Amino acid sequence: MRYISTRGQAPALSFGEAMMTGLARDGGLYVPETVPVLPAAEIAALAGLSYEETAFRVMRPFLGDTFTDAEFRRLIAAAYAGFDHAARAPLVQIGPNHFVLELFHGPTLAFKDFAMQIIGQMMQAALAKSGQRITIVGATSGDTGSAAIEAFRGLKNIDVVILFPHGRVSEVQRRQMTTPTESNVHALAMEGDFDDCQARLKDMFNDFAFRDGVHLAGVNSINWARVLAQVVYYFYSAVALGAPGRAVSFTVPTGNFGDIFAGYIARKMGLPIEKLVIATNQNDILDRALRTGDHRTNGVKPSISPSMDIQVSSNFERALFDAYGRDGAAVAAVMDEMKSGGFRISQGALQSLRETFASGRCSEEETSATIAATLAATGEVLCPHSAVAVKVAADHLGPVPMITLATAHPAKFPDAVQAACGIRPALPPHMADLYDRPERVTRVPNDLCALQALIRERIAL
């Protein structure tokens, strides 16, 4: 199994190399050279298996010889041992043919735990073999940062540096990043929005002297391993509802496009997914792009679903790569146009995207109304991001079962939830003292040189 860049100019890598590299050196994102297809009988055989066994069978074809089967099984077991629900990702029915997949039972209460916990295990195992030390730098709109810190805190051969937009994450999200006491954890509150944080992260990867000097690695969803780990719960939930004997659809609250792209990979692997519905909040660039073909930024508007306050969705490049017939030069050209604010998707590429993806937008008022209505009708308390997806999913319901991804615990956004439905969701016991823990955070400017100097200082290079 080899991995190639979406821009066509970087060397092909093994799974292990792609995982440790993150962003390709030509600025592109790594994708599998070919996507393995699981026969229907193998998909059917997933029925009734544990989440861990499903993860092994779904992910194993992508790993090559990076880990032995026994090693990989041990890593999976360690990754999901800290989840507080035996099913790991339970399905809850909220209406006729409409199900919510609860992805918030991990240690940081967000779907990012499904990928970050296994990446932490895999990276640690790979570094133990090589004896190397790495510096992980991540950008977050709220949940990636805390999940990365939880996965890598205290490890001797890894420093983890997280950039988050100052004042644009919830208090719970911020405190999850700023209260860990381990010396290898560095939380940086950066001026600007998430797109600024992500841009500086990419700048660091594209500065090869810095990248090589600090042994830079990435855990944002630019990292293929992140996407692969998220493919698992598409299979796990779809099989529970009868796949491959019947098709299912998914609605995904979408910011950086990584989670829904995992669904796209599941579809390419043979899972019978009829439609993947992109759910956006008021920062609706992906909905606009799919409807009009014009992918153009118009500024980030702060919302009550802050993890989706994004205008530059990195993983959309992976979808464009396939839509443009895997033409790296064409993708590089449209990504270059993106630097000036946007680009027009070619008619053929747009038609290809529309064959797989649908989309919808949810306003702030509709988000709050959906939280209240879902609680009244079902007793399920949704976080704002999940509510965005539930509202958009309702506009796409039909004879095929719809699975909506609930991506975060409502207690991560207590103010928004309380304002919407009158209930202030409590943090689980292991986080009950979060508001009492001292914070450790550094305020930083939106300046590449200043960030690089600070990172070198923190890791003593």
Image: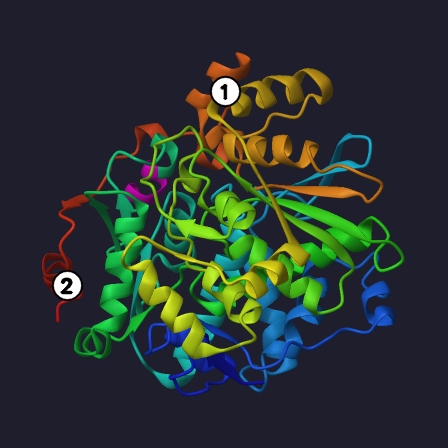
Q: How is the image coloured?
A: rainbow
Q: Which quadrant, please, contains the C terminus?
A: bottom left
User: Can you say whether 178 is above or below 16 in the image?
Assistant: above
Q: Which one is closest to the eye, mark 2 or mark 1? A: 1
Horizontal side of 154 relative to 14 (left or right) equals left
Q: Which mark, by number, is residue 365?
A: 1
Q: Residue at x 30, y 41 (%)?
A: 179
The boundaries of the magenta stretch are 174-179
User: Can residue 283 be seen here?
Assistant: yes
Residue 175 versus residue 312 in the image, above or below:
above
Q: Secondary structure at mark 2?
A: helix
Query: Callout 1, which amino acid?
Result: Glu
Which of the two residues, 327 or 164, is positioned nearer the viewer here? 327
Foreground residue among 143 and 263: 263
Residue 244 lies in magenta, yes or no? no
Would residue 161 appear left or right of 242 to someone viewing this image?
A: left
* 204 relative position to 282: left or right: left
Query: Going by the picture, which residue comes out furthest to the top?
Result: 422
Name the residue nearer the viewer: 328 or 90: 328
What residue is rendered at 72% in x and 58% in y?
Answer: 235
The span from disc 2 to disc 1 (Cα, nearest Å) is: 40 Å
Q: Position of residue 254 (x, y in %)?
A: 51, 46
In the image, what residue occupies the spot 42% across and 21% down?
Answer: 415
Q: Position of residue 455 (x, y in %)?
A: 17, 62
Q: Hey, which quadrant is residue 141 in on the image?
A: top left
Instruction: Name the residue located 14 percent from the left edge and 63 percent from the top edge.
Output: 452
Residue 21 point in image, percent of width and height: 38, 76
Q: Which mark is residue 452?
A: 2
